[in-house]
Image: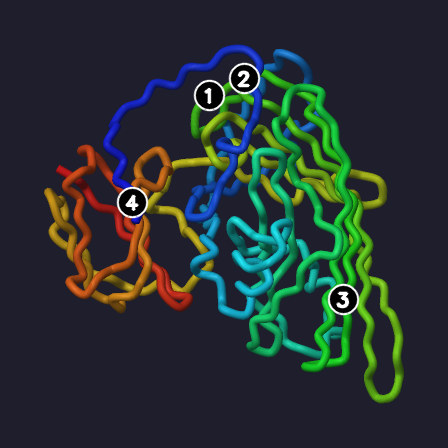
Amino acid sequence: MRAVLLVCFLPFLSVGQIILQQADFADGGDVAVMSLATDLGIDYSSTGANWTWDFSTLIAESQDLREFTSMSNAPFIVDLVYGPFAPSSYQASYFTENDDIPLDLAGSFLPVSITDIYQYSKVSSSAINSLGFALAVNGVDIPYKSDTIETRYELPLSYQDTYTSNGYTNIDANPIQDFIWRQYRTRSSEVDGWGSITTPFGTFQSLRIKHTITEIDSIYLDAFGVSTWIPIPVPDSYIYEWWTNGEKDAVLRIETSSLAGIEVVSSIEFRDIVNPELAISEQDEVEVRLYPNPVVDELHIQGFDFDAVYLIIDQAGKVVGDGIVGSSGSISTSGFCQGTYMLLVHSEGQLARVPFLKE
């Protein structure tokens, strides 16, 4: 169980250029609250040395709870490929929900049902790598490791650093179904700015990273005696990120796609605190009873199985406690500072989120 955060106030001190290292990125068990916004005219191109970026007018429309799930929660078959007995280069640190496989573009071509796509990642002092995927194919969890491992971040990262990485993944659904999905990716990255960024989350010293993603996808089908490769068009995409020290995810991330040679904003997300009025996660929400609220030393939970996983997030969006709801259905809060927290409880695709006050 994660130790309770005992320090209530920690001043932020940072000046000048920063360097990004392993500790600035998420690891297994971490959580980041990201607010989603829409602004087709947002300025993602302006950058440089000692730059000032002001995105304080962004308005959160919804929120996403990004879980970097520990490998202890990986399915058994998947754990054989990415767990401690895998080759060292494929031993994952965590897995996350992922949409880098553009199944929506395949449409009716796919002869199987594919759901619950997760990407497995390895964190080290030299890189953050994408090892491959696990997909639920017709309800069966199947791992598909990448033959060529893509590096998302080379570490440490400083202003004007550049790197290029390729990724190749071959997803062969045989013998469940005679089809193959191939994905070729090239990521070219450049740290093209440093300075101060302001979002609704706060003001931070940051590095700005631009990723250019070129991808070629195709699927192979053998149906009704006809075998063929079908190309899946994937437009070039760009990811603009602002990172600071210690936040585990980008302070701001803007993604664009190239349509007829013009970049079009496809998503905007920024680190944020939990807002109880905004929808969070796409899981099915269920009602749960939490008492007493306000709480002094111990919370009691009713409405979930005792093996459900819980997270407690403070007003800064940081996880300050986690674990399994025990047979008593209670959680100790004796070490928390006074203030407002968000309790998240999830089990088998169901989610409950309840704010509570610690006295």
Q: Look at the numbered disc 3 and give the secondary structure of its residue.
A: strand
Q: Identify the residue position indicated by label 3 in the image.
A: 181
Residue at 75% x, 50% y is: 167
Mark 1 and mark 2 in contact? Answer it, CB < 8 Å: yes
Amino acid at the residue labelled 4:
Gly
Give the mark, 4 or 3, whose residue is nearer the N terminus: 3
Q: Is residue 174 visible?
A: yes
**CA–CA distance in space, label 3 to label 2:** 42 Å
Residue at 59% x, 36% y is: 253
| Crowd rating for badge 4 (residues with CA inside 10 Å; few <14, some 14–19, many 20+) | many
Identify the image quadrant of residue 48: top right
**CA–CA distance in space, label 3 to label 1:** 43 Å
Q: Identify the residue position indicated by label 4 in the image.
A: 321
| Crowd rating for badge 3 (residues with CA inside 10 Å; few <14, some 14–19, many 20+) | many
Give the mark, 1 or 2, whose residue is nearer the N terminus: 2
Q: Identify the residue position indicated by label 2 in the image.
A: 196
Amino acid at the residue labelled 1:
Thr
Position above or below: 151 against 351:
above
Q: Position of residue 199 (x, y in %)?
A: 49, 27
Q: Hey, which residue is sitting farthest bottom in the picture?
A: 224
Give the mark, 3 or 1, whose residue is nearer the N terminus: 3
Q: Nearer the viewer, residue 257 or 339?
A: 339
Q: How many marks?
A: 4
Give the mark, 4 or 1, whose residue is nearer the N terminus: 1
Amino acid at the residue labelled 3:
Trp
Position above or below: 86 against 128:
below
Mark 4 and mark 3 in contact? Answer it, CB < 8 Å: no
Q: Look at the numbered disc 2 and give the secondary structure of its residue.
A: strand
